[in-house]
Amino acid sequence: MWADANVVKLVFVVSDTETESHLRKNVGAWSRLATPVIVNDLHQDEALAFLKEPYLMEHHQLAAAGAAGDSVVRRSVSPRTGKSMDGELAGQIVDLVGGRILQLIAMKRDWLYGVSFDDSAEELKYREREKLLQVP
């Protein structure tokens, strides 16, 4: 009902191609949807370039909020803000997660906050393992 009134936009994040074809089979629901935007995983060179960029957008937002005295800021800006990740570490991360955007962001965020690659990788593997075990 909310989607029909254009009050709510729903975003699906999926990692398979079957979801879209399944949704298309339900013509009534599909006809009310806006044209889907499909974002694929990054290619290896794009993933490496993303990781080597010296910033993550949220760091600029956190720094600006902190400078303005915003009490919503819950963590300090990283000491690594403005520094670039070296190519070897970026390569290790891409070898681990490929071009999966959410995982790349999580690994980069951890690096920016000083979390070691091994700890970050173990946490990521744990979360993914938990997702697999919760599938009915």
Image (spheres, rainbow, N blue to C red):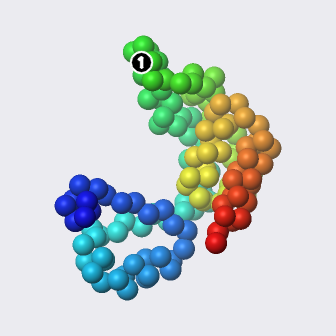
Tell me the kind of residue under disc 1.
Asp
Q: Name the outermost residue toward the right.
A: 118
Q: Quadrant of the N terminus?
A: bottom left
Instruction: Pinpoint residue 123: horizontal percent, then vertical percent.
Output: 73, 47
Q: Which residue is mark 1?
A: 70
- Horizontal side of 19 relative to 117 (left or right) equals left
Q: Residue at x 43, y 77 (%)?
A: 20
Q: Name the outermost residue toward the bottom.
A: 25
Q: Residue at x 40, y 60 (%)?
A: 11
Q: Name the outermost residue toward the left.
A: 5
Camera-side residue of 77 and 122: 122
Q: Relative to 28, is 70 above or below?
A: above
Q: Residue at x 63, y 33 (%)?
A: 112
Q: Please say whether residue 91 is visible from this viewpoint.
A: no
Q: Relative to 83, is 7 above or below?
A: below
Camera-side residue of 124 and 48: 124
Packing grade of label 1 (10 A; few <14, some 14-19, many >=20) is few
Instruction: Pinpoint residue 63: horizontal percent, then vertical percent.
Output: 48, 22
Q: Residue at x 25, y 60 (%)?
A: 2
Q: Quadrant of the C terminus?
A: bottom right
Instruction: Pinpoint residue 79: horizontal percent, then vertical percent.
Output: 63, 23
Q: Please say whether residue 8 is visible from this viewpoint.
A: yes
Image quadrant where residue 68 sits: top left
Instruction: Pinpoint residue 87: horizontal percent, then vertical percent.
Output: 70, 45
Which element carries disc 1, helix, strand or loop? loop
